[in-house]
Amino acid sequence: MSFISIDLDGTLLNGENEISEENKKAIQYAKGRGIEVIISTGRAYFDVQTICKKAGISPYIIGTNGATTHSKDGKVISSIPISKERVESILKWLNERDFYYEVFTDKAIYTLEKRREYFYQEIQRMKSTDLYKETATEAERQLDQFGYVLVENYPDILKQEEEVFNIVACSFDQKKLAEAWDRFNMIGELGVVSSAEHNIEITNISASKGNALEKMAILMNVSLEKSMAIGDSNNDLSMFRKVGYSVAMGNAKDDIKAVCTTTTLKNDDDGVAHAIYQFMENYVLQK
Ligand code: CA
């Protein structure tokens, strides 16, 4: 048996943040032939659930970059939080440097109201420039997530009792972002990835899409070698390394395409559907 692991933003979702009819059809086609479908994303579980419900699909869900995994009926399979002390030191550091950041728990995405306003204004300014238009549009889509809780100050986030799975820090200043990446990547218990030009995403070092996929494969008795993963960014690399058949989106950067088995069409051209049919035809049904 095999499975198909699909990233959301820039992959299964089109520019309108929706799952197209063509992509839905392809997912049903694969499921009808005994292939399990897994959504693997940096988004929070409750956000993904809302998107899937709207599309009428109920897949396994790897959320917050592998820090949480849920079964098709919503049961928690595993969860790997960042320690409370570490969350505090991360937020303090980001706060002092005026980052816009989002803190993901299993109930909400906490963020500072004022900074969200500033970040939104910055996005609008960036959108009007030629050079940053695309990055800014992507950042704007991020603000479309479901489950935001706006607070005044970062201690308001720290006093929440829920466990933290993922912290996303955003900036259009590449140097500032790189500095944050180096800072947190240095800390042994943390893992850092990126899902877009304007962000870095911090999790527990044990949490990654690839590790979550590996655990699921054992649990479901599925061969990773016979499975497919589709994605478009740096945070998909860990799952590309685990499967036998990896697919980069047409809209992915060249360094992502270079490590994949093949490249499919862009997310706005139903690239996922195209990849699923190719995979079924050339890889699954041939064997
Ligand atoms: Ca993505």
Image (cartoon, rainbow, N blue to C red):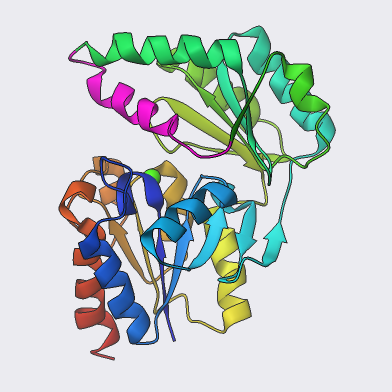
Residue in front for this viewpoint, 175 or 131? 131
Q: Which residue is drawn at 75% across and 30% down?
A: 87
Above or below for 50 versus 173: below
Above or below for 192 versus 283: above
Left or right relative to 111: residue 173: left
Percent position of residue 53, x then y: 45, 60
Percent position of residue 121, x then y: 40, 10
Left or right relative to 25: residue 157: right
Count up the numbered dots.
0
Above or below for 189 versus 184: below
Percent position of residue 233, x then y: 37, 43
Q: Quadrant of the N terminus?
A: bottom left
Can residue 197 be seen at all in this image of the molecule?
Answer: no
* Magenta span: 130-147
Residue in front for this viewpoint, 236 or 4? 4
Q: Residue at x 62, y 69 (%)?
A: 215
Above or below for 245 versus 69: below
Can residue 18 be seen at all in this image of the molecule?
Answer: yes
User: Where is ligand 1, by quadrant?
Assistant: top left
Residue in front for this viewpoint, 33 or 28? 28
Left or right relative to 285: residue 118: right
Q: Quadrant of the C terminus?
A: bottom left
Q: Residue at x 42, y 68 (%)?
A: 243
Residue most extreme to the bottom:
287
Q: Which residue is drawn at 55% across and 58% down?
A: 62
Percent position of residue 51, x then y: 43, 52
